[in-house]
Image (cartoon, grey):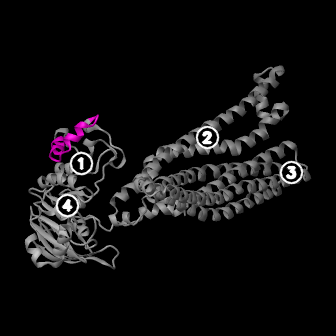
Amino acid sequence: MMKQFFRFLVYLKPLLLPFILALLSGVVASAASGFGIPMMIDKVFPVVFDNSKLPPFIQDILVEMVAPDRLHMVVLITACLILPLVMTIRGVATFINGYLTAFVGMRVLEEIRMKAFSHLQMLPLSFHESQKKGDLISRLLTDTQNVQAGITQVSNDLIKQPMTLVSALCFLGYQAAKTSQTSVLLSNLFFVSLSIWPIYFFGKRMVEKARRAQKELGDIMAVAQENLCSQREVRSYGMQGQQVAIFRQLTERFIRIQMKAVKYKQFLVPVLEGVCALGLGYLLVRCNSVGMKESDFMSFATALFMCYDPIKRLGMTYNRLKQAQASLERLNFILDQPDNMPDPENPVPLGKVKGNVSFRDVSFSYDGKHKVLEHINVDVPAGQVVALVGPSGAGKTTFASLIPRFYEVSSGSVHMDGVDLRDATKADVRSNISLVSQSPFIFRNSIIENIRLGKPGASDEEVIESAKKASVHDFAQQKEQGYYTMLADYGDGLSGGQKQRVAIARAFLKDAPILILDEATASLDSESENKIQEELDKLVVGRTTFIVAHRFSSIRIAQRILVFESGRIIADGTHDDLYVSCPLYKELYDKQSI
């Protein structure tokens, strides 16, 4: 487990100075606790009540400096000042340690979370499509928080608490040597070592409970995210009660697992307290039997207590690490996912391409077994408008998705202006492609910023010009704050047609030579489709365009049609040619013409 944590310690490198200061302040606080407090009980407190117990060399100094009648008061004041001095040093060091540890922890958390989030941006779509979104959110938020707590706590307590223990043990050794009670020291060490066993015992039982709890939390977040994204369906089908019942079942299961973890975590405290009490009780009997003085016993007892306190805290730290281990495994699941579509080490620069696209003996499978596309060979010259038609599941959208390299071909190659897409960077490839999908995503931002996504850094004038081409200008101007109107999640506040126009405006602004229209009008009514089609007619001019469509009304502008069936292109031509020569095309067309 520790080896897994060490991989994250690299994030401490830029925070080395505050981290070292945190450790040093922890050492000071530990020494003040483990050695300073027992030493005060042994050396300072007795002097308050009996000046004769002052060390001889101090007595000689004070006799020369202070009148005999004021000696007691000076000694009393000096002794009493030592206590707040030690406690102040301990308190200030503890504050510095706690503050800097929290600061370092926050920064480490930020870096871990950003690394995980950045890695998610690089992983292929196939990974995202196979995962529950709510569970990924749980890994990003909750699990990174647990790992951060584990890293900072182990980094802090593995220095601070052992130092406190060592300081206390040093004082025990000092007292044993002073009083010639080695047997008392050995018996104390026996009880100290005895307290380690319950830490190990309960820690082993913590990790499985923590692992199950984090998995359940991920399921809860997945259900919540799914519910909040489907409120129309939930209400339309009267699913509120069902959804509440599912959520309650998951939360109750989560609580049961959590309480089992809490049981082991909290039970450790009374067990260690019992061992401590047993040790102190034995110490009392043993010291009494050997005739130890009360002051020596008190210092022994305090030092022994100072041994148990860091052990107890180390036990809780160990359990915390066991909990973090489960989160670490879930976080490593993201970080260890390979990018199976890496950019080449020496990429071919594409620049702005003309728009020639070629598929050369391309086959593709999502799972490595069932082929979605088989032996696709097609050349599309720059500027040609191509429609992709066929029954559902024939491979049309998959074909279009291989052009921006959303997926890696299983065999064969896809070329853009003669360059294999695998020889160029994904960013270079995608900078030459605009995409308008059936359900374009509208971000929680203003209308103008949603359009500016097509060309980050574009001026307001450029954005508005693109908006006018896509017929966004009129409805944007009608909003209370115009183009700067803030939109809710998923573009709530805009109709389906308005969302499509915003996506088309993005494509106009990007001005890429290749355009993919993936069912761009499929979710619109006939009137909205006709209006959107007018904007699309303008958008495709001069661009290599691929139109994925079920509605034949949306492909009237196509110069060429590819007919897909069971992952193959079975026909290629114009509407008039295919209607005569391709039975499948004729069947699909006639069904929509009835």
Mark 2 crowd level (few <14, some 14–19, many ≥20, 10 Å Cα): many
Instruction: Tell me residue 239's x, y (percent).
Output: 48, 57
Residues marked 3 and 4 touching at CB (< 8 Å): no
Looking at the image, tell me whether mark 1 or mark 2 is earlier in sequence order. 2
* Image position, residue 167 (x, y; %): 68, 48
Q: Amino acid at mark 3?
A: Leu
Q: Earlier in the sequence, mark 2 or mark 3?
A: 2
Crowdedness of circle 1 by 10 Å Cα count: few (<14), some, many (20+)?
Answer: many
- Horizontal arrangement in the rendering, residue 317 relative to residue 344 (left or right): right
Type of amino acid under label 4: Ile
Q: Residue at x 15, y 74 (%)?
A: 586
> Which of marks 3 and 1 precedes in the sequence?
3
The residue labelled by disc 4 is: 516
- Point out the tag, 2 or 4, that comes first from the N-terminus: 2
- Name the quadrant containing residue 468: top left
Mark 2 residue type: Thr
Residue closest to the eye, 528 or 368: 528
Q: Position of residue 502 (x, y in %)?
A: 23, 48
Circles 1 and 3 in contact, beta carbons < 8 Å: no
Q: Residue at x 77, y 33 (%)?
A: 57
- The dot on residue 94 is 2
Measure the C-alpha gap from mark 1 to mark 3.
Answer: 81 Å
